[in-house]
Amino acid sequence: MRAQLFRHTGQAIAVILFSWMLAGCGINNIPTYDEQVKSAWSQVENQYQRRADLIPNLVETVKGYAAHEQETLTAVIEARAKATSIQVDASTLDDPQQMQRFQEAQGQLSGALSRLMLVAERYPDLKANQNFLALQSQLEGTENRIAVARRDFIAAVERYNTEIRTFPGRIWHTLMYSDLQIRSNFEATSENADQAPQVKF
């Protein structure tokens, strides 16, 4: 009876010790980092959506002062429509072509917004309008949030990719998580991508 108790206790200790060793050796890192990548991407999408939500009000305000700038206003509206129609979610995050289309559409929207801000330079009354100033300030803040969200996404992808390509993560990837692949990172694809959109007056 005593020997049996020792044996069961020994088995329980072995199971606990083995579980502790598995938890400490990085077996959970890959799914954890995968979830962090998805979460970081959701934050990128959230900030792009925030920008898209500001645009109709911005266009309407500019239209009130510069209605004859129809070509620029139309370009912004069309770029917004295209940018919001292309979605990259957790199920398509690993599709490089979809990611590139998304990034190109967002880049085109950034370019159209830059042109809209240049138009506003020609209208002193518009530049002094409180609604426009508030929208312009929100847009600046949103562009900053987009940059931070993209930076965080890039860091999350780097951490995830490094984990599945280095020891011991590479072993766990091969044994348990082979369905999870190397992820493409965010790449600037728009013209003048090294420059932030001009939203100051």
Image (cartoon, rainbow, N blue to C red):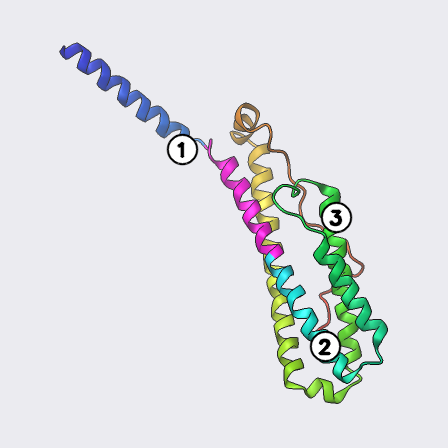
What span is colored magenta in the figure? 26-45
The span from disc 2 to disc 1 (Cα, nearest Å) is 56 Å
Q: Can you tell which of label 2 and label 3 is closer to the viewer?
A: 2
- Main SS class of the magenta portion in the image: helix
**Residue carrying label 1:** 24
Residue 117 falls in which quadrant of the image? bottom right
The span from disc 3 to disc 1 (Cα, nearest Å) is 37 Å
Residue 76: give x, y in percent of width and height.
Answer: 77, 68
Q: Residue 57's mark?
A: none
Residue 189: give x, y in percent of width and height.
Answer: 77, 53
Is 43 covered by the magenta stretch? Answer: yes
* Residue count near mark 3 (Cα–Cα under 10 Å), binned few <14, some 14–19, many ≥20: some
Q: Residue 60's mark?
A: 2
175 w.r.t. 192: above or below: above
Q: What residue is at 77 percent from the left and 73 percent from the top?
A: 116
Q: Please state which of residues 166 and 135 is positioned toward the viewer in this rendering.
A: 135
Relative to 87, 168 lies left or right: left
**Secondary element type, mark 2:** helix
46 w.r.t. 132: above or below: above
Q: Please state which of residues 33 and 45 is positioned toward the viewer in this rendering.
A: 45
**Residue carrying label 3:** 100
Amino acid beneath label 1? Gly
